[in-house]
Structures are given as structure tokens and as C-alpha cells.
């Protein structure tokens, strides 16, 4: 399926904005350069290219996203890899066997723009679809030395609403309470704030019983309570 990967890259090249590219790169503090292609244009490129050359099998889909991610010369190629992995019509093709791929993306992406998308839109649906297989992996990630894997374990239930595994959420947060990193503290607050939309009493009790929460995490968690 190199044809689809090549077509997507060609679409990015055609939509490149040399003036926007350095601005986007500076905003993301990215070592990898940008083409300067905004999200709406990327969505159109993805839609048109997939319509022209749809991946016929899960294996073909995996080959395309791997080519885009591992062969990326511009950051938008990796954005397209994650977008394609969760693209409508193919969103059910990835299963728990994709977790090593997502782990690789989290560790090599290592920044919030990649990690938050992977956590919420890729890992989260897998967790809800295959909790028996995915939950133990999230518990491993929650205690991994890599902070971005821990952030993924914390944020993977942002869209779970009433299906949230609160034991997993609590354990993932508690594993990073002593970490002083901004993105973990912000992520903890975000996860709690989001779950407060579903169960505000649980979140209030969690905050009250965890005085070691950082001021940032606490502020974010209670923002709407």
C-alpha cells in the first residue's frame, strides 16, 4: 500500500504553506519540520486519498500507517498516520495487537500533540472494546519510566463517560502523583475534570482524599465543580 502513503505525502506537498510551516514548528517546539498544512486541509487530503485507494485489509492499513510514521520527514505525515488509524470505516480494524504500534508512536512522538490523540482516539476505543486485553497493558504503562506512556494511561479514558474504569483511572493517576512534570500534572487534572462530567461526586471524593495532588491538578479537576 505504498501508493496510498505516497499519495498522502504528495497531497501534503501540494498543500504546503512555506510561511505557516516554521510558525507551526515553533509552536510545537518540534525538531521535525512541518509542511505547513492545517488540520482541515489534512482531513480533505486524507478523505480524497482514501477514496481513491482504500486499504483492502487491516494488514494493508497497518503497512500504510507504519510507512507514514516511521518514514516521516514532516510532522503532518505522523498526523495522517494517527488519523488514518482511527478513520471512519477502518476504526474497528485495529485491535489489541496494535498496542505495541501505539506504544512505539507514543515513545517516539513524545509530545502532547501526538500522545493526546493516540491516548483518546486510538487507545481509548481499544480499551472499551477489549478491556480484558488492554487494561493490563494500561496498568503497565501507568508505571512505566516513560512519562508519555504514563500520560497515555491517564488520558485514555477521556471519552469513556459511563464506561470509565474508575479503578484503572485512580491507579493510573496515583502512579504519577509524585511526578513534578507539567504534562503529567496537567493530564491528571484533565482526566479528573473530564470524568467529573459523568461522576462529579467520585471526582470530588478523589480530590479530597488525595492531598498530594499538585495545585495544578487540583485546580483543573475542580474547574467545573
Image (tube, rainbow, N blue to C red):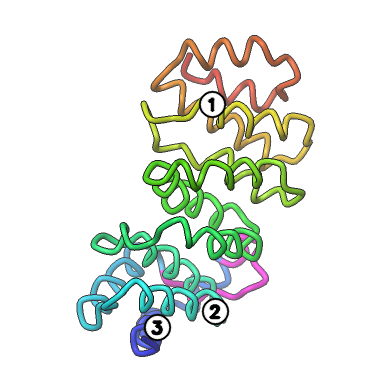
- Cα distance between the residues tagged 2 and 1: 34 Å
Q: Quick one: 30 or 67, which is closer to the camera?
A: 67
213 vs 39, left or right, is right
In the displayed structure, 2 sits above or below 113; it is below
Q: What element carries label 2?
A: loop
N-terminal label among 3 and 1: 3
Q: Is the residue marked by circle 1 packed among few (<14), some (14-19), or many (20+) residues within 10 Å?
A: many
Which residue has dot 3 on it? 5
Quadrant in the picture for the N terminus? bottom left
At 50% from the left edge and 42% from the top edge, which residue is drawn?
156
Q: Quick one: 85 or 196, which is closer to the camera?
A: 85
Residue 35 lies in the magenta-colored region: yes
Q: Is the residue marked by circle 3 packed among few (<14), some (14-19), or many (20+) residues within 10 Å?
A: many
Q: Quick one: 134 or 108, which is closer to the camera?
A: 134
Q: Where is residue 16 in the image (x, y as percent from the top left)?
A: 42, 79
Q: Where is residue 124 in the image (x, y as percent from the top left)?
A: 44, 45
Which residue has dot 1 on it? 192
Q: Is mark 1 on a helix, strand or loop?
A: helix
Question: Which residues, given as a range, are shown in magenta?
Answer: 25-37
Q: Where is residue 211 in the image (x, y as percent from the top left)?
A: 73, 14
Residue at the far front: name it: 132
Is there a contact, CB below 8 Å, between mark 2 and mark 1? no
At 30% from the left edge and 75% from the top edge, which residue is drawn?
57
N-terminal label among 2 and 1: 2
Amino acid at each position: 500500500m505504498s501508493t496510498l502513503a505516497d499519495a498522502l505525502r504528495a497531497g501534503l506537498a501540494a498543500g504546503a504553506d512555506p510561511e505557516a510551516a516554521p510558525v507551526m514548528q515553533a509552536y510545537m517546539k518540534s525538531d521535525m519540520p512541518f509542511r505547513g498544512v492545517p488540520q482541515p486541509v489534512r482531513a480533505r487530503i486524507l478523505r480524497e486519498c482514501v477514496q481513491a485507494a482504500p486499504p483492502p485489509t487491516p494488514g494493508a492499513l497497518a503497512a500504510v500507517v507504519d510507512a507514514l510514521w516511521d518514514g516521516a520527514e514532516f510532522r503532518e505525515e505522523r498526523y495522517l498516520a494517527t488519523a488514518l488509524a482511527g478513520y471512519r470505516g477502518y476504526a474497528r480494524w485495529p485491535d489489541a495487537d496494535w498496542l505495541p504500534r501505539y506504544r512505539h508512536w507514543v515513545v517516539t512522538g513524545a509530545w502532547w500533540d501526538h500522545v493526546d490523540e493516540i491516548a483518546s482516539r486510538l487507545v481509548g476505543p481499544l480499551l472499551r472494546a477489549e478491556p480484558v486485553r488492554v487494561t493490563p497493558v494500561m496498568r503497565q504503562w501507568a508505571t512505566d519510566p516513560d512519562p508519555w506512556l504514563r500520560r497515555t494511561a491517564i488520558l485514555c479514558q477521556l471519552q469513556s463517560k459511563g464506561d470509565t474504569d474508575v479503578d484503572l483511572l485512580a491507579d493510573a493517576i496515583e502512579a504519577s502523583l509524585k511526578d513534578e512534570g507539567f504534562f503529567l500534572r496537567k493530564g491528571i487534572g484533565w482526566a479528573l475534570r473530564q470524568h467529573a462530567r459523568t461522576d462529579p461526586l467520585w471526582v470530588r471524593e478523589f480530590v479530597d482524599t488525595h492531598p498530594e495532588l499538585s495545585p495544578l491538578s487540583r485546580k483543573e479537576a475542580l474547574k467545573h465543580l
